[in-house]
Amino acid sequence: MSTTSHEREQNFEQSVKRNPHPDFKKVEGSRPDWRERITEDGDGPPLYTKTRDPEWKLGQGGNDNGKSLEKEHVSIDPYEEGRPAVFNYKLMISAIVPRPIGFLSTVGKDGSSNLAPFSFFQMVNFDPPIFVAGFLASTKEPKDTLANIIETKECVVNVISEDFVEAANACSINSPYGVSEWSLVGLHPAPTKVVKPSRVQEAVFASECTLVEVKEWQSKAKPDTVSGAMAILEGVNFWVRQDAINEEKNGIDLNVLRPVSRLGGISYGRVTDAFELLRPDFAKESQKREVQELMKGDQTATPTQ
């Protein structure tokens, strides 16, 4: 008997062994309480600090006085014989961090709604506004969100904030098709202008999107099978909470947005500290004698021995 996409997802989650704790609630209970930002009522902004080395100059390299160069590296062949493909998944999600989360709301042709978070997500263009979302499924046997996007060619991308991270995480529950995560977790649907799916009222930023195309990925571990798919989405209408947007409608207040990101395993990240770095101006920097000397060096980077 063939397995369904829902059953395969269940099997995959069991193979990942995402939770590193035998008793998560016991471990969580031993940790400090949630730390509010700066002030007791939580209204403080992220703390902006200097960069690690404010006096850094071109040609200097790392800011750790060469300590990282003293460490050895291990070469890992992702297709090494006997290496399970899930090992690459666990390695990559622990290395490519922090990852933004695409909190996607969709509606199927039958009218059933779905709300789910995806950490294989990113913006890749602004004109037109383009987002990409990755799914561990095929277009022939897609799970709920991807199935709805393929059927209706639309969705809403919502950004997750600290204010509702528990509810957003709960939307990753392995519920069967037809069970609405909206009512299950208590989030509130809000109207949209262009697409049918609702946006999340709690979300500071949301983008109504239409499907551009779906690209599938062929498995290397199991030839002739599809291991995943990527949906390319175009933003066709934005929503920003009124107290978060600036007058020009081209910037969002980080202290209002308070985004969260995905790290490895079951870990999330917060933006509580930040620093700023100017982008160097070549015309200006190239006038400096020390930079001119750097430019005379070998243009081909060769590994150090």
Image: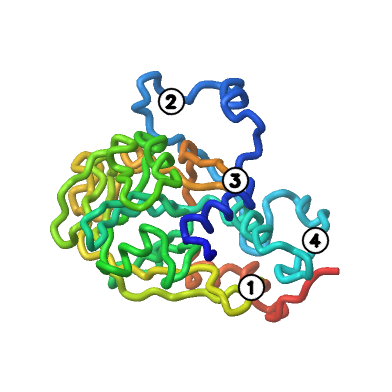
Residue 222: give its label. Answer: 1
Q: Which residue is mark 2?
A: 36
Residue 294 placement (x, y as % from top left) = 67, 72
The kind of secondary structure element at disc 2 is: loop
Indicate the quadrant containing the C terminus: top left, top right, bottom left or bottom right: bottom right
Q: Give left or right: position of 107 versus 33.
A: left
Q: CA distance from mark 4 to mark 1?
A: 26 Å
Q: Tell me which numbered mark, 4 or 2, is placed earlier along the sequence.
A: 2
Q: CA distance from mark 4 to mark 2?
A: 39 Å
Q: Distance of mark 1 from mark 2, alpha carbons? A: 47 Å
Q: First in sequence, mark 3 or 2: give its number.
A: 2
In the image, what residue occupies the spot 59% across and 73% down? Answer: 219
> Neighbour class for label 1 at 10 Å: few (<14), some, many (≥20)?
few
Disc 1 or disc 2, which is closer to the eye? 1
- In the image, which disc is placed on residue 265? 3
Residue type, label 1: Lys
Sequence-earlier tag: 1 or 3: 1
Closer to us: 259 or 46: 259
Q: Which residue is mark 4?
A: 74
- Look at 48% across and 42% down and name the residue there: 274
State the residue in front, 247 or 289.
247
The image shows residue 110 at horizontal and vertical percentages of 22, 59
SS label for mark 1? loop
- Dot 4 surroundings within 10 Å: few (below 14), some, or many (20 or more)? few
Label located before the other in sequence (3 or 4)? 4
Q: SS of the residue at dot 3?
A: loop
Q: Residue at x 61, y 53 (%)?
A: 56
Asked if the residues shown at circle 4 and circle 2 are in contact, with their CB atoms under 8 angstroms apart, the answer is no
Q: Position of residue 70 (x, y in %)?
A: 83, 54
Nearer to us in this view, 171 or 264 = 171
Q: Amino acid at mark 4?
A: Val
Residue 116 shown left or right of residue 156 in the figure: right
